[in-house]
Amino acid sequence: MYCEKTNRKKLRWILFVLSIAVLGYLIQYIFMAQKTQFDEIIYTNIGKIMTEPVTIVMKLFTILGSGVTILSIVFATLCIGYKKQAKYMTINLLIITVLNQLLKFIFERPRPEEYRLIQETGYSFPSGHSMVSMAFYGLIAYWIWKNVKKPTLKWALCILLAVLIIGIGTSRIYLGVHYASDVIAGFCFSVAYLIGFTHLMKGGREGETN
């Protein structure tokens, strides 16, 4: 049991370091050029998968990462009696939103201009939807992993949330409002942030069911 706990702790901090390393690598490219080679490859090939059904799915994913949807989940969590969870969700959202806006104003990266399937304003780097969805749905996944006892249900819910997070990030690239590097940077930043946030919550005890 002790070895297993120690290994999980090591894995968390390895993931933290890797996330910071990838984020730093992307930031270096943003300072040197507007787009990375990876961005160019994605935008060269993304048109090949553009169909009306895919566009509908991508727009749905973007809605699931919107402020209205996420705040509705927080409100619903509060209404069903999970006050501690709603409190930490709110704190989490406030912190990650402020950090995202701060980073956007630091880097001032314009949004892509190649095409737009939806309209967005503001700067591009890092993706707000990606940062917020990783921080918000990632926190829910963390609580599920800590508190759900049935392994099958635990894995199913966490995989579902992972697909949701990736889908939200992918939708921002597909819809033409973010570069791929914006999304990856948003994910990396929030993974590192979430590791620190959950650590401050003392191993997630505040997220346990009432």
Image (spheres, rainbow, N blue to C red):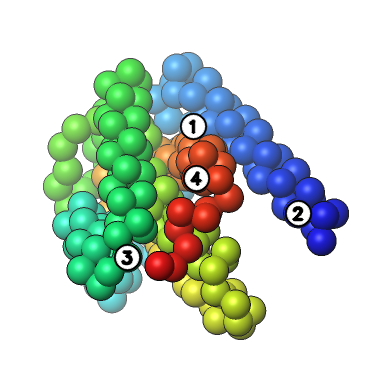
Position of the N terminus, as image quadrant, is bottom right
CA separation in Å, label 4 and label 2: 17 Å
Q: Secondary structure at mark 1?
A: loop
Can residue 179 be spotted in the picture? no
What is the x, y in percent for residue 38? 52, 40
SS for tag 2? helix
Residue beneath disc 1: 36
Q: Earlier in the sequence, mark 3 or mark 4?
A: 3
Q: Is residue 167 above or below residue 80?
A: above
Residue located beneath label 4 in the image: 201
| Residue 18: quadrant of the picture | top right
Q: Earlier in the sequence, mark 4 or mark 2?
A: 2
Which amino acid does the dot numbered 2 rest on? Lys
Q: Between tags 3 and 1, which lies in front?
A: 3
Q: Residue at x 49, y 24 (%)?
A: 27
In the rendered view of the protein, which quadrant contains the C terminus?
A: bottom left
